[in-house]
Image (cartoon, coloured by chain):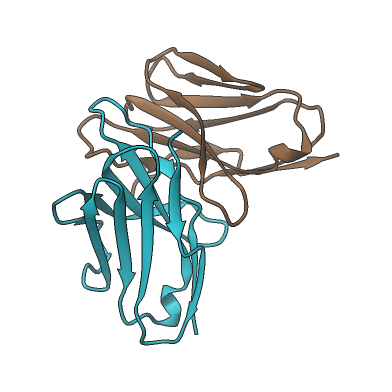
């Protein structure tokens, strides 16, 4: 099935560094969601975006809905060890029966 | 708010047996629930969409007679893996979407690790 282009695939950073990841698509989306998944757990919703150009923060996390409606990014500032995990973007297109289209994930490792 | 539970969290069964996994929305009503399968280090793969009071919609390539889905109430959906085989071993995750028309967020359960011997 269709998937979003998510990059980078993995990141290994030092504690305190900022992190940026993004998702792109050739299709227009009307909702972008960012999730984090810890090993052996289900994804946890971090940020939901509903409007083109929307910039939303959740603590040290900031995400934006691209103006073209075909992309979104997630930034994490001042990373800490508990930020370790896999981050997924997911998008929803109009008239798609509410089925999310998923990115392949960005695996984040933080070195204390 | 928006808590989804799954039971069991982990199950080991013999080949040929059936396994039922429950997905519950604890503090909201979910007109739609989704069942996913996830392989190690991979993204989530949608198996089926479950709508309360109607038949589930299965994704292409997913056998509906193999993976039976029942969404009997606005807070409960079940996935039964029938005649399980080792290749069915996987991490199964459900999600639930609140019933508001413009509310697109999905909330996920903690997942069920199925191992078929």
Q: In this rendering, would A97 be left or right of A112?
A: left
Q: Position of residue B52 (x, y in %)?
A: 19, 48
Residue at coordinates 30% horizontally, 77% vertically from top-left?
B82
Residue at coordinates 35% horizontally, 46% vertically from top-left?
A2
Residue A71 vs B23, above or below: the answer is above
Residue at coordinates 32% horizontally, 64% vertically from top-left?
B79
Q: Position of residue A95 (x, y in %)?
A: 20, 33
Which image quadrant for residue B7? bottom left
Nearer-the-camera pick, B75 or A19: B75
Residue B82 vs A39, above or below: the answer is below
Q: Residue furthest right?
A: A112
Which image quadrant for residue A25? top left
Which image quadrant for residue A31? top left
Q: Which chain is brown?
A: A
Nearer-the-camera pick, B75 or B32: B75
Residue B96 vs A55, above or below: the answer is below
Residue at coordinates 37% horizontally, 51% vertically from top-left?
B24
Q: Residue furthest left?
A: B54
Q: In this rendering, would A110 be left or right of B12?
A: right
Nearer-the-camera pick, A38 or B59: A38
Disc count in the image?
Answer: 0
Residue A73 vs B111, above or below: the answer is above
Q: Which chain is cyan?
A: B
Q: Position of residue A57 (x, y in %)?
A: 57, 18
């Amino acid at each position: 099935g269709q998937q979003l282009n998510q990059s980078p695939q993995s990141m290994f950073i030092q504690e305190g560094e900022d992190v940026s990841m993004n998702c792109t698509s050739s299709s227009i989306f009307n909702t972008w969601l960012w999730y984090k998944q810890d090993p052996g757990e289900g994804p946890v919703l971090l940020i939901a975006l509903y409007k083109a150009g929307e910039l939303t923060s959740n603590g040290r996390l900031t995400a934006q809905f691209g103006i073209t409606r075909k992309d979104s990014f997630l930034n994490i500032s001042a990373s800490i060890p508990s930020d370790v995990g896999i981050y997924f973007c997911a998008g929803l297109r109009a008239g798609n029966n509410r089925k999310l289209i998923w990115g392949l994930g960005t695996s984040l490792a933080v070195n204390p | 708010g928006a808590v989804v539970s799954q039971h069991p969290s982990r199950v080991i069964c013999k080949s040929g047996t059936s396994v039922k996994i429950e997905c519950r929305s604890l503090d909201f009503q979910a007109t739609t629930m989704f069942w996913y399968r996830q392989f190690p280090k991979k993204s989530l793969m949608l198996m089926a969409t479950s709508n309360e009071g109607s038949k589930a919609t299965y994704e292409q390539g997913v056998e509906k007679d193999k993976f039976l889905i029942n969404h009997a109430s606005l807070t409960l959906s079940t996935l039964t893996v029938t005649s399980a085989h080792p290749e069915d071993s996987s991490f199964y995750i459900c999600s639930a979407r609140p019933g508001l028309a413009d509310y697109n967020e999905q909330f996920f359960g903690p997942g069920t690790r199925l191992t078929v011997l």
